[in-house]
Amino acid sequence: MTTKIQEFLEAVVRKNPGEIEFHQAVTEVVESVMPFIEENPKYEEARILKRMVEPERVIIFRVPWVTDKGEIKVNRGFRVEMNSALGPYKGGLRFHSNVNLGTLKFLAFEQIFKNSLTSLPMGGGKGGSDFSPKGKTDNEVMRFCQSFMTELQRHIGPDTDVPAGDIGVGAREIGYLFGQYKRIRNEFTGVLTGKGLNWGGSRIRPEATGYGCVYFVEEMMKTHDDSLQGKVCTVSGSGNVAQYTVQKLIQLGAKVVTVSDTQGYVYDKDGIDQEKLDYILVLKNIRRGRIREYAEKFKCEFHEHQRPWGVPCDAAFPSAYQNELNGDDARKLVANGCRAVGEGANMPTTPEGVRVFLNGKVLFGPGKAANAGGVATSGLEMSQNSMRLSWPMEEVDRRLHEIMIAIHKNCVKYGRDADGFVNYVKGANIAGFIRVADAMIDQGLV
Ligand code: NDP
């Protein structure tokens, strides 16, 4: 690490104490982008990086709500409006007990580059609460969402800031949040994405992150004249991203052998087919049960409180949570012959894990590129809302696929090393940076 990078990072740590995940996300970007900035002094003169790590605005608010038993609870709500150089702030809401300002700043920072990579007009933002919907009734979740939106509504709007879902925020939560926004503002607008199909949602939005991630990995494999057909794949998580990653992998002829949740992972040697996936969709999205039940139903192995990275595979798709795949996990994957990794989740691989993959010449698709299909399709939802049109499934999927191919191409353009190996981390960071940085320069010192 050069002195310049070190000094920059030390200043970020001093200014944002204790925000470990934010430091991690900034470190990865700065290490990739600083050499490029040194070759292009206009970015240094405009202090672009220094401005990018400072949120344009952070909103923190109280969210009081009442349980079914009449007990009063108080949670904390956040919206980090990180960068609006390319368009309205855009990024999901996360409802999870571990949420804090540092987590959301890391996610909002990542979002700037991810949204830039999509080439759509979207700035970067992220929000959420330390509220967990797990174990709550529908009525409790509704009351929480209504209270959360009662404050958030004054800060967002279809041309200002357009939140979406993330961990703990799915179709149910988006519905309750949208209903409250509409009630307070008396407006039916595209203020949230991930809406229901019959009230302004886009086709393919639920599928988009998982499908997009698989499209991206497919592009990486093509550079080695290979494909996903017949490949053994491991997936972590069993939520929105994992579900549709599994579905697209099945469609492309791959064999998916794992899924997981916070309690452990399932190892299904025979592979998960569409029928078994349908069971997971009902289990996780409707019954809100545990993935262990899959192992019981289909008589396969369940590994309690373990992660699936010791299972031999050709390609791995971490699709659950940040830092869920560490250096040891990465070494196991490489030793077992894993040739490609697509990060469906945001920052699921630790910095050491990333180094292991890059040193092992694994095709490594970082989250800000590989999982950008979700926000890209949110962008398409915003366009459809503005036009008051609803595109057919084939059209949205085609656009999503084209966007993922274009992101891959852009990563290759900026990520190719002297020996020909493509470092997609570097490529994604630099490609994402340029578009935002140029817009910031054009817009003056704001
Ligand atoms: P969901 O809430 O639908 O699913 C989350 C999954 O992760 C569940 O299987 C959950 O298990 C598991 N999980 C939650 N917390 C932890 C933890 N601490 N350790 C290990 N596993 C955990 O969320 P999504 O599928 O939407 O999001 C998954 C990841 O993808 C996140 O990193 C998110 O930021 C990222 N992402 C999501 C996008 C989207 O469009 N939804 C877009 C781009 C990125 P359990 O059921 O036990 O809680």
Image: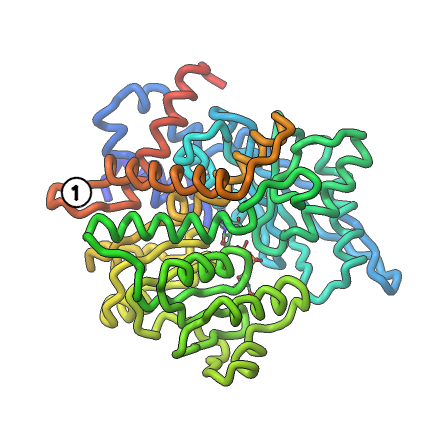
Left or right position of 306 against 71: left
Q: Give coordinates of residue 335: x percent, y percent.
A: 23, 70
Residue drawn at (37%, 58%), measured in percent from left and top? Answer: 252
Residue 215 rendering spot, x and y as whole percentages? 37, 49
Q: Is residue 197 above or below residue 72?
A: above
Image quadrant of residue 422? top left
Residue at 52% in and 71% down: 276
- Quarter holding residue 188: top right
Residue found at x 72% / y 52%: 75
Seen at 87% across and 65% down, the residue is 69
Image coordinates for residue 173, horizontal then vertical, percent = 69, 51
Which percent across, then down, holds residue 403? 40, 37
> Which quadrant is the N terminus positioned in?
top left
360 with respect to 133 (left or right): left
Q: Is residue 443 something one can see in this rendering?
A: yes
Left or right? Give the position of 182 relative to 102.
right
Residue closer to the observer: 174 or 251:
251
Within 10 angstroms of label 1, few (less than 14), some, or many (20 or more) residues? few
Total labels: the figure holds 1
Question: Height in image: 46 above or below 301?
Answer: above
Q: Nearer the viewer, residue 398 or 359?
A: 398
Residues 210 and 177: in front is 210
Residue closer to the observer: 8 or 213: 213
Residue 110: in sight, yes or no?
A: no
**Left or right of residue 358: residue 110:** right
For this orientation, the residue located farthest to the left is 419
| Residue type (three-letter) at the residue carrying disc 1 | Asp
Q: Is residue 202 above or below residue 364?
A: above
Report the residue marked by disc 1.
Answer: 417
The kind of secondary structure element at disc 1 is loop
